[in-house]
Amino acid sequence: MRKILIATEKPFAPVAIKKISKIFEKAGKEYNLVLLENYTDRNELLQAVADAEALIVRSDIVNTEVFEAAPKLKIVVRAGAGYDNVDCDAASAKNVVVMNTPGQNANAVAELAIGLAIFGLREMFSGKPGGELRGRTLGLHGFGYVARNVFRIARAFGMKVIVYTHYSKGAAAAIGLKVTKSLEQLYEKSDIVSIHVPARGEHIKSVSYEVMKHLKDGAVIVNTARKEVINEPDLIKIMEEKPNIKYMSDITPDCEKEFAAKFEGRYFFTPKKAGAQTAEANINAGVAAADQIVAFFEKGDVTYKVNG
Ligand code: 3PG
């Protein structure tokens, strides 16, 4: 029997678990789905993974320690987009395949990005006069699945949308979206910047002072990506220099205390990453993860493999 472990500190919606279970039931008697949800002690994960052949996680850290504890492990699927929580080199060293489920939770994250933009523009519903999305310029920093959903929604709000992307210029141009020549230009022209780049390579700390200094005072930065893509000391500096900039994020920065001390009313951080925390996103990403695992074991399908 193959043990398939779902290990999620932040659990899937029960309806998603039901659908995932059905996939493994249908796939045959050799699949044994085991749940480790809401765990608080990493030892629970290390014990549970000891006899697992497949692992489904969300933002849970899967590092060397986990691979060492899981001698039978063949595949890890990060049910979601960003796989910065999985040590891909450590996985490859143990011949473990790592996959993500690209696009599956993108609409949920995009809806949160728009929600954060509105929340920021409306002065966090404090009663102070705010602003509207209609007529404002939204700058998309990156143009992956989430950004494309943000674009679709923003257009319905009557926003002007521009984008800076290195890798998806063709896709943006194909739908008539203006691609700025530089990241600096994107930040300069936007009333709201929404960040949609992964925490990898050149994107790490790509939102720097050199880029943010071009922002209009009064701009709103929305970050539903990762804290690593923003240079935090630079963010603090720009918020000091431009007293009307707001920072709305689905990820609490390391410098949270400094924000609390200096920028009251100009920032919001979700208490726990909430972008993909909808029943729909859980179903989409969870079901995709289960399907990918079955396809991997039954047909050797490695379509969504992300490690070398
Ligand atoms: C992702 O990378 O897919 C999102 O950040 C969602 O992460 P989560 O599964 O921890 O909610």
Image (tube, helix red, strand yellow):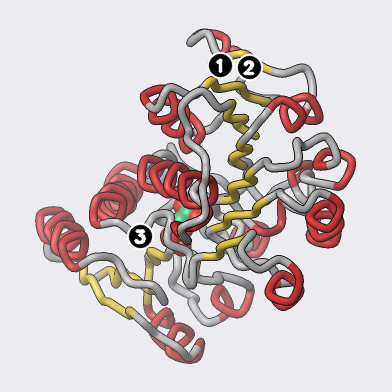
Q: Is residue 74 visible?
A: no
Residue placed most toward the observer, 212 or 108: 212
Q: Secondary structure at mark 3?
A: loop
Q: Which residue is mark 1?
A: 172
Q: Is residue 230 rendered to the left or right of residue 132?
A: right
197 over 2 or under it: above or below: above
Q: Which quarter of the picture shows residue 276?
A: bottom left
Which three-letter amino acid code belongs to the residue tagged 3?
Gln
Which three-letter amino acid code belongs to the residue tagged 1?
Ala
Which three-letter amino acid code belongs to the residue tagged 2?
Lys
Q: Secondary structure at mark 2?
A: helix
Residue occupying image coordinates x 47% and y 70%: 272
Query: Mark 3 CB in 8 Å range of ligand 1?
Result: yes
Residue placed most toward the observer, 171 or 32: 171
The residues tagged by marks 2 and 1 sit, at their Cα atoms, a distance apart of 5 Å
Residue occupying image coordinates x 77% and y 37%: 215
**Dot label at residue 199:** none
Q: Which residue is mark 2?
A: 169
In the rendered view of the protein, which quadrant contains the N terminus?
Answer: bottom left
Q: Residue 88: x, y in percent?
A: 62, 57
Q: Is residue 63 visible?
A: yes
Q: Is residue 228 rendered to the left or right of residue 241?
A: left
- For label 3, the crowd category at 10 Å Cα-Cα, with few meaning under 14, some 14 to 19 and many 20 or more, is some
Q: Which residue is mark 3?
A: 277
The residues tagged by marks 3 and 2 sit, at their Cα atoms, a distance apart of 30 Å
